[in-house]
Image (cartoon, grey):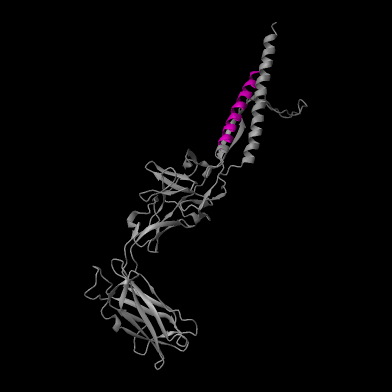
Amino acid sequence: MLRSLFSGVSGLRIHQTKLDVIANNISNVNTVGFKRSVTTFNDVINQNLSGATRASEETGRGGTNPMQIGLGSNVSSINTVMTPGSAERTDGANDVMISGDGFFIVSDVTGFYFTRAGAFQLDEAGNLIDSNGLRVCGWSTDENDQIQKGRVDGINLYENNKSYLLPQVTDSISFSGNLNSTTDPEKVSTVTFFDSLGNRYTVNTKFTYDQASKSWNFSMENTAMVNGNSKQTVEFTGLDAITFNLTFDDDGTLVNNTAGQDLQLSLAITPDANFPFNSTFADEITIDFSKLTQFNSTTNASANNDNGYEAGSLKGYSIGSDGIITGQYTNGLTKTLGQIAIADFVNPSGLEKVGSNLYQTTVNSGEFDGIGVEVGASGGEFIGGSLEMSNVDLSYEFTQMITTQRGFQANSRIISTSDEILQELVNLKR
């Protein structure tokens, strides 16, 4: 009698555990990046009443099966299901989800943790952090803005003076586009260049077609507008004396001109005595005309400042599908600030949940090497402006809850029935 009683108790216990798991799944149905768990049962030790026998020719009897009575059930496993959740669009600049395998790497002084929840923020120190304040890890850049893949560390968008861009002196300008000698024999354009303080100077230029020599004359004014202010101008010595002759082949492509010059003009920027700024210019600015054409089409020749710019401060950033973080600056330029890395495990279900959407490694998950991989290494990508929803399926959980309730109810009946039988035994002495 007591065997059935204790089997019923074990059935109550495991069904209560399964109900606890189901309740936790349902309570986290809207938790970002949550992974549901499933509970499996197994039977426990069986008591042998008799062993199996083989067929015997001597007795003329066949073999018999063993007779066993089970002694209840036990929880076999509680497994984390790592199937991906659906994407929830948030349009948040700091939100990102992993489409594919892997985990974001976050850290503090205690070590690395792993998460699928990509609701990130930028703190006042420039650290990219998760909702728990842990730093999101990845790779930084070198002085040439190239990603340096090594041991991952917390990403900081302000480190190494990334929060601003120093001004860059212009030393190269190039013209591109078309000059039409028939419809527009005179083309006025502008050239822009920058000094060491980031002041922007705009100088008028002119292309004039000479019918006699079948070539174009290029000239510049010596007065420049400063920082887009038409009321502030400065003068440069000798610019108005600069002329350049350009000759095109009969197929419309630029060739070395008749004066023996090549396709580039080198000039020195020398301000006059009234120059108001304590700044310097490149020793020599090269103007490249090699991308100009002379076709029978619209005249659209214009100059491009190849490498100079004013100072700028970081005003925003974006995370690409490859995890590369690109900063946008107030001067219109962009710069690579770093790259988010992910961790990929041999057995992700072997990770241990530690709360707050975080996991840590176990002896059965596989170790983290401290370096990480690109999200594309396993065919995945990052989706910006989105978060991964919980993978909890309410219809499945409710169905499991019903069957678990019935299992609990049935095991309670075993206990009540065993109790009634024990009561009958007690009544035998009457």
Q: Residue at x 66, y 17 (%)?
A: 419
Judge whether residue 324 can be spotted in this image. Answer: no
Q: Residue at x 61, y 30 (%)?
A: 15
Q: Residue at x 38, y 55 (%)?
A: 140
Towards the viewer: 98 or 198? 198
Quadrant showing the N terminus? top right
Q: Is residue 250 above or below residue 178?
A: below
Looking at the picture, how far across and down is residue 341, in whole percent? 45, 52
Please state if 210 lies on the left or on the right of 41 as rendered: left
Judge whether residue 267 can be spotted in this image. Answer: yes
Looking at the picture, how far across and down is residue 53, in whole percent? 70, 27
Looking at the picture, how far across and down is residue 30, in whole percent? 55, 42
Q: For residue 20: magenta?
A: yes
Looking at the picture, how far across and down is residue 332, in whole percent? 40, 64
Q: How many marks?
A: 0
The answer to which quarter of the image holds residue 42 is top right
Magenta range is 1-24
**Given the current orientation, which residue lies at the most extreme left position?**
273
Please state if 227 lies on the left or on the right of 54 as rendered: left
The prevailing secondary structure element of the residues shown in magenta is: helix
Quadrant showing the C terminus? top right
Please state if 62 lies on the left or on the right of 34 as rendered: right
**Given the current orientation, which residue lies at the most extreme front position?**
231
Please state if 427 lies on the left or on the right of 162 as rendered: right
Q: For residue 5: magenta?
A: yes
